[in-house]
Image (tube, rainbow, N blue to C red):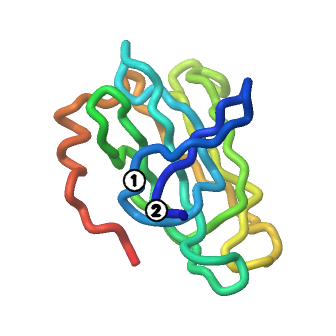
Amino acid sequence: STDYFRIVDAKTMKVRVGPKLPVAGGACISKALTIIPNEPPMICSFAGTQGNHDRGTFLPHTQCYDRIRKKWWGPFGNLPYGLDHGSLAVVPAGTCHSKDPARVLIFNFRTEPYGNPHPEFLAHDIPNEGWSIETLTKYEGKVPAK
């Protein structure tokens, strides 16, 4: 089912069901990211497909699972369009210029089933101070874009 996050144990390769996703869909672009400083990284899912890859809907949603509070947050908001099968890279703060924040780059993705890779990169700044619970709470309850 694409209603739940799946967790794979890298040592045993056993799969177990994780937390229920707020928006059902595959999570083909995922990464553990530090969202709240001094807390464990959250597993963040970017986009994915709801349904099968032949006729499914590519989703614009992003979501990060907070293992301490056992809830999903949306610090990255929605992407400008639905996508799937992409790559993600984190560019550390100060890489290009000493004052630049860290950034999440999403690239080499598709915007239609079995389509060609999209020619754009998507970039999202990660605040130098991270996010706070207060800031994350502001995004809570927002209706995902269709």
On the image, the x and y values in percent for residue 109 come to: 72, 62
Mark number displayed over residue 3: 2
- Quadrant showing the C terminus: bottom left
Q: CA distance from mark 2 to mark 1?
A: 6 Å
Q: Tag 2: Cα neighbours inside 10 Å, few (<14), some, or many (≥20)?
A: some
Residue found at the very far right of the displayed protein: 116
On the image, the x and y values in percent for residue 111 come to: 67, 74
Query: Going by the image, does 89 lie left or right of 66?
Result: right
Q: Is residue 24 above or below residue 98?
A: below
- Label 1: state its secondary structure: strand
- The foreground one among 119 and 41 is 41
- Label 2: state its secondary structure: loop
Task: Residue at 56% x, 47% y: name it.
Answer: 6
- What amino acid is at disc 1? Lys
The answer to whether mark 2 and mark 1 are in CB contact below 8 A is: yes
Task: Residue at 35% x, 49% y: name it.
Answer: 74
Determine which residue is flagged by label 1: 20
Task: Residue at 45% x, 65% y: name it.
Answer: 24
- Quadrant showing the N terminus: bottom right
On the image, the x and y values in percent for residue 51 come to: 58, 77
On the image, the x and y values in percent for residue 61 come to: 45, 61
Q: Quadrant of residue 13?
A: top right
- What amino acid is at disc 2? Asp
Q: Quadrant of residue 104?
A: top right
